[in-house]
Amino acid sequence: MALIIRLGLVLLVLTAAGCVRDTARRGSMDPRAMQAESLVQSGDYAGAMRLFQQLAAASRDPDYYRLRAADSALRAGDGRTAKQLADAVDPGELETADRHDYTLLQSRLDLNVGRAREALAKLDSLSMGRLGPPQKAHYHTLRASAYNQLGNMLESAQERIKLGYLLTHPDAVKKNNEAIYDELARIPEKVLATMQASAPDVLGGWMNLTQIMKTTPPAGLSTELAKWQARYSGHPASGQFLRSLLSQRQGTLPGQAHTGTAPPAATAPGTTAFVGVMLPLSGPYASAAQALRTGLLAAYYADPNPAKPPLRFVDTGTGNIHQLYRKLADEGAKTIIGPLLKENLATLSGAGELAVPVLALNQTPEVSNDRIYQFGLTPEHEVEQAAGSAWFDGYQSALVLAPATSFGQRMVKHFEAYWNQLGGTVRTIKTYPYHGEDFTASVRSLLSAAPLATQAQITLPPIQAGRQGADFIFLISDARDAHLIMPQLTFHQGEPIAVYATSHVYSGRTDAGADRDLNGLIFCDIPWLLDPSDSGPLSQQSLSSQIQQTPSDYLRLIALGIDAYRLLPKLERFGAEPRSRYSGATGTLSLNSGNRIQRQLHCAQFEDGIPQPRGIAPLLRPRENTPALR
């Protein structure tokens, strides 16, 4: 189940209800307006937007139609146009109910670019007593999404419980219940146990149910759920939803504890559909492939679906990538995961029409194919989100420190372009010797570019009033060099400037003693590594033996394998619902243009050697009229 459930679909249903109200209030409408509303109902949002824009240009009620055009643009996935249209609306010219819709739209625009706090502030300005039922449902949906973006699953679930009382369509109720359960399932068991209120509290009932599902062996589950139902009679999770949970758990295969040392048994070629997996199981990339294989197998054995197709692995190090693809397709593969290497991805993309869809485990801007979805741990995305976190915290002036390597310079170039597009400035860029022993000269040279007045003003943690325009350091480093650089920054600076970095600074293994050298450092990483208390079947705890056997450099590839398997049934929905989100091990996942999977990371700050959560990384859009990044 997805942690963020089909927000676009829910908003479509709710806003469509609002359209009926608007039509009735205006009485006799222009035929083009009726046509535009019909296009909204049919899902042609781009067409509806164009008609609403025409109506805005010719109508005596232009602001209302601009509002409707902005709503349609946002549904069509065109956030930039939606914002332009919304900014052109004069809310003072709107009727009261439309002003409420305008505020709801503005909060949606904030959420669309990861500005959850701003969205909540706008929603807080609304008076619930003045909202109609569809607007109230919309209000709670948006608040739930905002809290979800901030990583506050408990508050998000509370908003969805309130939303549940306003929903009447069975499918909407089902999706909302799934979202509540999925959000609470992300909360550690100890928190679920200590914070839940006693019966008949509805939230307490959801928390207790989630705890039962996470901790009870299949053999005793029916008994425990019967006890739960007696305690929480009439709870929203009773009935069909409870039966579906029980059915899913009882359908779990005994092999869930499989170590991943061998793939599931494949049936004879051509007899049963299967999922093909193309990985470089031999050669220089075999260790990376093994980590991916571990994640894929773990997700496979944790999948309770008894009808799931088996996985069949092939080694891309032993043959032509296109021939391997054709062989899998001819023998009955329904989907193919891989390849991993960019050159193989480019070869496959240029090989003509692909009969079977592909979920590639890498991304490259040069590749575009309607049958290939690109999903990888792209370092440029990490740079953007770490930089976005600094911008979100109020910093505008960057000092960049990077290794004197081709990778370091590639990341510097991307950071500088993105930071400039956000509106920031790069004061200086300095390099250091990769895996060197003494970084004194590099650190001193970097800090000499920060004015003393600014240095004296900056202390950790970085989120404080009055930081607008202050300096910060963007560090490009792996864990080894970061452990040596951070103490030197502290020593030479006295009171360190805030430092932001990508996931490369964190080994992925909690080590408070060694990582105290990194105290104060802010970085963005995959949620799977930042929540060691999670105890689900795919958590670090459950996969501890596989993790111990995997080098630190490849730990994140286990999470990539987990998500690759779990994304397969969601790819079609991603294409049909552009606003769809899935909360995965590697981040909150969505589909961008070119069939590229976008990962929204979580951020943390080292305190006493332990990464402490700071929330979900913002996805900020660069300013207009600036050169493209890629």
Image (cartoon, helix red, strand yellow):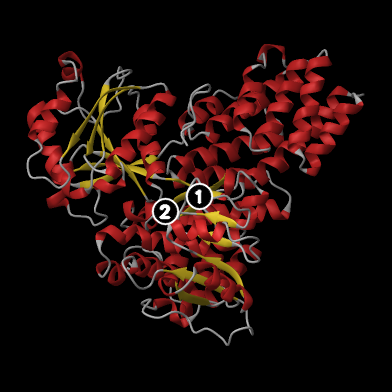
Q: Which SS class for mark 2?
A: loop
- Circles 2 and 1, Cβ within 8 Å, touching? The answer is yes
Q: Which residue sits at x=48%, y=72%?
A: 300
| Residue 43, percent from left and from top | 76, 43
Q: Amino acid at mark 2?
A: Thr
Q: Which residue sits at x=62%, y=29%?
A: 104
Image: 605 above or below 29: below
**Crowd class of label 2 (few under 14; some 14 to 19; many from 20; radius 10 Å):** many
Measure the alpha-carbon separation of dots 2 and 1: 8 Å
Position of residue 479 in the picture relative to residue 36 (left or right): left
Which image quarter: residue 497? top left
Q: Which mark is residue 589?
A: 1
**Which residue has dot 2 on it?**
586
Nearer-the-camera pick, 569 or 267:
267
| Residue 333, percent from left and from top | 60, 74
Q: Which residue sits at x=56%, y=66%?
A: 229
Which image quarter: residue 285? bottom left
Position of residue 576 in the picture relative to residue 36 (left or right): left
Q: Which mark is residue 22?
A: none
Which image quarter: residue 454? top left
**Crowd class of label 1 (few under 14; some 14 to 19; many from 20; radius 10 Å):** many
| Residue 294, percent from left and from top | 38, 70
Q: In this rendering, does residue 173 appear at all?
A: yes
Image: 540 above or below 391: below
Position of residue 150 in the picture relative to residue 267 (left or right): left
Q: In this rendering, does residue 226 appear at all?
A: no
Nearer-the-camera pick, 203 or 395:
395
| Residue 11, percent from left and from top | 67, 40
Q: Amino acid at mark 1?
A: Leu
